[in-house]
Image (cartoon, grey):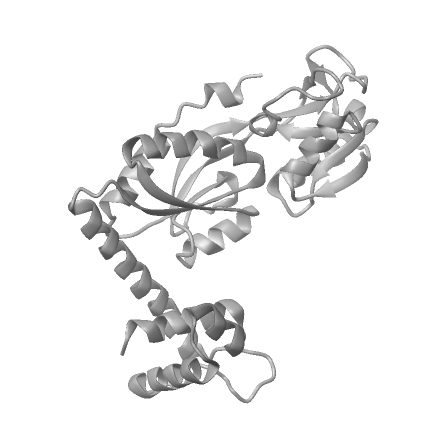
Amino acid sequence: MFLRQLTYLIALDRFRHFSRAAEYCGVSQPALSAAIRQLEHELGVTIVMRNRRVFGLTKEGERVLEWARQSVAALDNLRQEARFAQAVAGGSLSISVVPPAIQIIPHLMENLRAVVPALQLSLTVGPNAQILRDLAEQRTQIGLAYLDQIPAESPFETHCLYAEQLVVIASSRIRLPGRRRCSWQDAAMLPLCLLEPGTRSRQIIDAGFHTAGCEPTVLLETNALELLHAELLAGRMASILPVAAIPARGDMAGPLQTRLLEPCPMSKVGLVRLRQPARTALMARSWEIACGLVLDDVLTL
């Protein structure tokens, strides 16, 4: 059995297509198919169901895939540990983050690179559920996610960084009620651009409007925080965002106004990683640095 066979199997499950998996791995489709068949022969089980139009793995194949992911991840960790032990100030780390917390990442990267200057970072942005799946399947190493979505009995370790506070935000072109605070009823009257319903932040917002018994005026839904910022900065719409997701600069239509949205439950946002019996020095140090983040500049209005 060779490592490349396990790598091919992981790619095949990711793309659910032999040709695309082969292209990703840089080999021909016959070569990839032959490697999978050889793996089946060596293990004495059928991994891939070939008599179906839709790609699928057998039950035995699903178990082999799980062990393949663990084996490939363990070898990657071993390589990193060897580099770290040789005092090479580098390595690679993958981080996944929910959209409302994206502005935390520059602070995290700065702190990480202060200790590991040559650190290679891979960053993905996605919904909470996808981050947890990627952590469980070892596609990513650290998540920045909503902790209230993680069951007590789970394979994850967590560390809370902050409690998320929602605010109504708009340019001076749009009149916001009150001076410091805004009710759900008042927010419902504004032309709103919001994150899409699949995000945890939007689910909290929808629940707030539902509890208040009002229907919001939503003109734009998107999973791109940059687009929401563009609409805010242009003065075309208002939004409801966590404090950590407020645009870092002023807007083209005048200074941004903010109002605390009340009443509003606070959701805990923090770090998540998969429980494992052994940690590389890089992973252990990265987690320690991330847990020590000071976010006053990001979370203060």
From the image, which quarter does the N terminus lie in?
bottom left
Q: Closest to the observer: 157 or 169?
A: 169
Question: In this rendering, is residue 177 above or below 21?
Answer: above
Q: Please state the horizontal and vertical placement of residue 72, each as a whole percent of the image.
A: 32, 64
Q: How many marks?
A: 0
Do we see residue 90 in this rendering?
yes
The outermost residue toward the top is 179
Left or right: 114 as drawn, with respect to 108: left
Which image quarter holds the C terminus? top right
Q: In the image, is 137 to the left or to the right of 222?
A: left
The x and y percentages for residue 88 are: 21, 43
Q: Quadrant of the rendered structure where residue 193 is?
A: top right
Question: Where on the picture, by quarter, is residue 291?
Answer: top left
Q: Quadrant of residue 290?
A: top left
Judge whether 239 appears above or below 11 on screen. above
Q: Residue at x 51, y 40 (%)?
A: 148
Left or right for 4, reference 247? left
Residue 69: x, y in percent? 36, 64
The residue lying at 35 percent from left, 76 percent from top is: 5
Give the x, y percent position of residue 100: 58, 35
Is 9 on the left or on the right of 185, as rendered? left
Q: What residue is shown at x 53% (from left), y 36% (from top)?
A: 102
Q: Is residue 208 visible?
A: no
Q: Nearer the viewer, residue 131 or 23?
A: 23
Residue at x 42%, y 59% (from the top left corner): 137
